[in-house]
Image (spheres, rainbow, N blue to C red):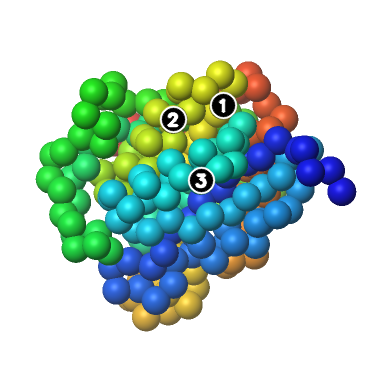
Amino acid sequence: MSQNLPHILLTGFDPFGGESINPSWEAVRFFDGRRIGGHRIIARQLPTEFAGSLRALKAAVREITPVMLLGVGQAGGRAQLSIERVAINVQDARIPDNAGVQPVDEPVIADGPAAYFSTLPIKAMLAALQAQGLPSEISQTAGTYVCNHIAYAMLHLASKRRGVRAGFIHIPYLPEQAAHQRGAASMAKADVVLALEIALRTAIATTVDRKLAAGAID
Ligand code: PCA
């Protein structure tokens, strides 16, 4: 048992918005302690709270000193795995977070840049997921709620640490959530778990991203 493997911090969120589960944590927790591509995965649940999630993220980074951070969150209504390209320096909450706080047009980091691009190989990850038959896309916005906030914070923290990369993936509802929402798309947990394993393996193995067209017109 090698204790000294480099660590990857993989995060999911607790339920929010009236849901009783969050698919991100349901999938992410499967990986805690597992070894993938010569790395040890440490899974952590973050609260769906602007301030609380940042505190928990900073504490986890201090404790684990990860070489890679991958955040995962629920994007109810999206039909595919969404590999996020960018995180922006704004909090604009349509609903209060789990602490009852609803920031509008506040920065994530007061003196931070307007945005960070993912430093994971998003196109290589997309190609690997599609090759497995998993519905996936590049997303050009992670929203302005707690997921974007954490994606931005991960990239901000990573930017200060040499060689540390970070990124974010939004996932659809699980079928049991979609079952009571008319017309909502969903993805089975086994598929999400497989997708996250492929995404992690690809991110670990790929330092220079592929050049594949996966942009959006709207
Ligand atoms: N999704 C929310 C926050 C927590 C989660 O799982 C979002 O997309 O911002």
Whether residue 56 is situated above or below residue 45 in the rendered picture: above
- Choose the circle earlier in sequence order: 2 or 1: 2
Q: Is residue 80 left or right of residue 51?
A: right
Query: What residue is at 68 percent from the left and 26 percent from the top?
Result: 206
Read off the residue under disc 2. 157
Query: What residue is at 72 percent from the left and 30 percent from the top?
Result: 205
Residue toward you, 3 or 162? 3
Q: Is residue 188 left or right of residue 115?
A: right
Whether residue 29 is situated above or below residue 167 in the rendered picture: below
What kind of residue is marked 2?
A: Leu
- Choose the circle earlier in sequence order: 3 or 2: 3
Read off the residue under disc 3. 60
Residue 40 position within the rendered picture, expressed as x and y whole percent measured from the top left: 71, 45
For the residues marked 1 and 3, what is the alpha-carbon distance in whole angstroms? Answer: 14 Å
What kind of residue is marked 3?
A: Ala
User: Can you say which quadrant of the picture contains the C terminus?
Assistant: top left
How packed is label 2: few (under 14 Cα within 10 Å), some, or many (20 or more)? Answer: some
Q: Nearer the viewer, mark 1 or mark 3?
A: 3
Residue toward you, 4 or 206? 4
Residue 127 position within the rendered picture, expressed as x and y whole percent measured from the top left: 62, 36
In the picture as drawn, the residue positioned furthest to the left comes out as: 104
Residue 62 position within the rendered picture, expressed as x and y whole percent measured from the top left: 51, 38
